[in-house]
Amino acid sequence: MTTAAPDKAPDRISGMFDAIAPRYDLLNRVLSAGIDRRWRARAIRSLQLTGRETLLDVCTGTADVALQAVSAARVIGVDFAGAMLSIGWRKTIAAGQAGRVTLLRGDATRLPVTDNSVDAATVAFGIRNVQRPEIACAEMARALRTGGRLAILEFGVPRIWGVSTLYLWYFKHLLPAVGRMVSGHSAAYSYLPASVGAFPPPAEFMAILERAGFSEVRADPLTFGIVYLYTGVRR
């Protein structure tokens, strides 16, 4: 599924997500058949939070991870798409969690937090949208205290032949069509398969995490490898 890398200029990507923000949550539920909540829950469990930690959620979008994790940690969510953050803030207020969730506008490659200031970090389906993912990984390592845990969810390609054939047809044809119909945005859901196809394979991305400062790095396939959960510990 390797493809030419799509344009990931920050202004283009943030503008694209701002444009689809009103329908973003609906499309996540529809296009994943609701499984996305289970993927996020698995990532949060891997962090082994006790309720006393501070979690940094990078590329927080509409704050889905932040709100799922808020019972186990105080959360700082960072994203560069203002419309996505506005929806996330409204969801946070509606959930009565404004005291436990802080949302900041910022770039994943220049995180607006100090060194060694958080206990855990997450990225859910956002690292492939970063123009320089190796810099974002190094930034999360900078922000984490020694021993802090990282969990990254990102799309992959199933390795089981029959599953991969069906999945690639869905991903390349049906998903962009449904995305365009519901969101009204012609490019965003064509960008999705292109960005997944251009993202490094698991072994290569694990090496990026290790170079950024993480040990005990793993890549666990979820749902036949549709999604990978990358985990690591700040050295």
Image (cartoon, grey):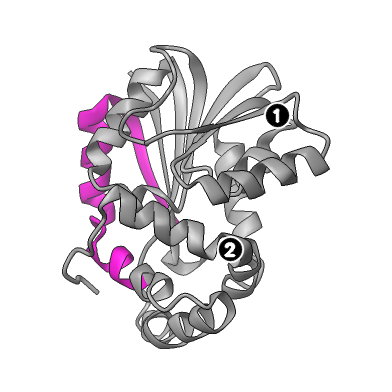
| 219 sits left or right of 198 in the view | right
Residue 221 percent coordinates (x, y): 43, 57
Q: Which residue is depicted at the point 36% across and 55% down?
A: 13
Q: Which residue is depicted at the point 42% across and 65% down?
A: 225
Q: Secondary structure at mark 1?
A: loop
Q: Which residue is depicted at the point 56% across and 26% down?
A: 55
Quarter of the figure with the N terminus: bottom left
Circles 2 and 1 in contact, beta carbons < 8 Å: no
**Between 4 and 22, the one nearer to me in the picture:** 22
- Is 225 situated above or below 174? above
Q: Which of the numbered marks, if any, corresponds to residue 24?
A: 2
**Between 59 and 180, the one nearer to me in the picture:** 180
**Label 1 environment density (alpha carbons within 10 Å; few <14, some 14–19, many ≥20):** many
Amino acid type, residue under disc 2 in the picture: Tyr
Q: Earlier in the sequence, mark 2 or mark 1?
A: 2
Q: Does 3 lie within the magenta span?
A: no
Q: Which residue is depicted at the point 37% across and 79% down?
A: 164
Q: Does 214 lie within the magenta span?
A: yes
The reply to whether residue 109 is in sight is yes
Residue at numbered disc 1: 72
Occupied quadrant, residue 116:
top left
Specify start and end residues of the magenta stretch as a single range. 193-221
Residue 20 percent coordinates (x, y): 52, 65
Q: Which of the numbered marks, if any, corresponds to residue 50?
A: none
Amino acid type, residue under disc 1 in the picture: Ala
**Label 2 environment density (alpha carbons within 10 Å; few <14, some 14–19, many ≥20):** many
**Between 48 and 177, the one nearer to me in the picture:** 177
Separation of disc 2 and disc 1 at Cα?
A: 25 Å
| 210 sits left or right of 66 in the view | left
Q: Secondary structure at mark 2?
A: helix
